[in-house]
Amino acid sequence: MRNNHSIINMAAHFRDTCSAPDTSTSDHEEDVRAFIGHCDRETEQGIDIALNADFTAAAVKGTFSRLRLQSAMGPDDIPPSFLRHAPDSLIALLTALFNYSWHHGVLPRAWRDANLFALFKGGRKPKTDPSSFRPISLTSTTAKAFERLILTRLWSSVGHKISKNQAGFRKHHSTVDQIYRVLNAIRGAWSVHESLPIAFLDISKAFDRVWVDGLLFKLHTIGIRGRSWRWLRAFLTDRRMRIAYNGVYSEWVPLFAGTPQGSVVSPSSSWCTSMICRRHHAVVLSTPMTLPSCRTQSHHTT
């Protein structure tokens, strides 16, 4: 990207990428939208009290103290060091701001904006093609600190409902766990002289094309309701991004689908995937891998 024209083209490419496909004639989509509207009007009665409680200044201060000073700033230009060394008076003000946002399901515009850096994927891909780049979103440091507080709540509330086979975006889990599971299944099938069908799915633009209403439906289904659900809805909708390159920025462009890469709570979409796989006894592998030669039927889907 050497000029403003390239930056404009890149912004247009990712705007189109982060747009949901046209499913306006889908009865299923209409049902989900109606359900979303019901959830938005849902009362606090019967809602998980611990999940939806106010945040304390002590919790906010603890989160700030663990921020990585090397993290890049978002569009608001607030560095992590500013929050990490914040005095008690500022922490009290930000705690009040967080709780207002939490109570009413609203977020400042700056918390839903992202500077997008296009990272070249490498290989022989042409650098003139926008699809040769991976979008990395740099969002507000303040918003990410709040997301960490919320993510802790979400995991405490619904973590036990997540399939034990889910390894992505979980502490103390990795692709090594999935490799072990696959090899163990292969050995089991080999020992009884049976074939083992395996499907490897490499989902293109898994973050960029997330259907937000569908994700909110899934989150509600696993028990994320009340203030937490309404906050996540506000966080995931009405988002904007701009391309940033060597101090030059594109115009802001709206995003109609997807979750921001680089966000703290974005991987929550993988939890919903794990719920589906738990029901159907499937295996989700987070990266492609090469398996040893054996008597298996391998079907590759891209």
Image: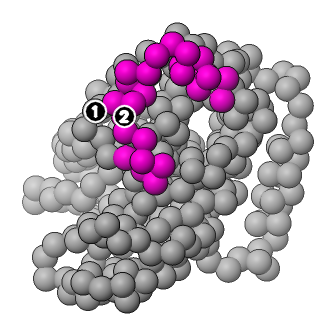
Answer whether labels 2 and 1 touch (C-beta < 8 Å): yes
Instruction: Assign a secondary structure to mark 1.
Output: loop
Q: Position of residue 266 (x, y in %)?
A: 49, 47
The residue at 79%/24% (across/down) is 47
Q: Is residue 140 above or below residue 171?
A: below
Image location of residue 44, percent across then percent down: 85, 26
264 w.r.t. 126: above or below: above
Q: Is residue 38 visible?
A: yes
**Residue bounds of the magenta highlight:** 73-97
Answer yes or no: is residue 188 visible: no
Against 152, residue 259 (above or below) is below
Q: Is residue 36 magenta?
A: no
As drawn, is 47 to the left or to the right of 51? right
Q: Residue at x 81, y 70 (%)?
A: 27
The amino acid type found where label 2 is placed reads: Pro
Q: Quadrant of the N terminus?
A: bottom left
Q: Main secondary structure of the magenta part?
A: helix
Depth check: 296 or 235 in front?
235
Quadrant where the C terminus sits is bottom left
> What residue does disc 2 label?
80
Q: Position of residue 106 (x, y in %)?
A: 72, 42
Q: At label 1, which amino acid type do we have?
A: Leu
Residue at (80% x, 51% y) in the render: 36
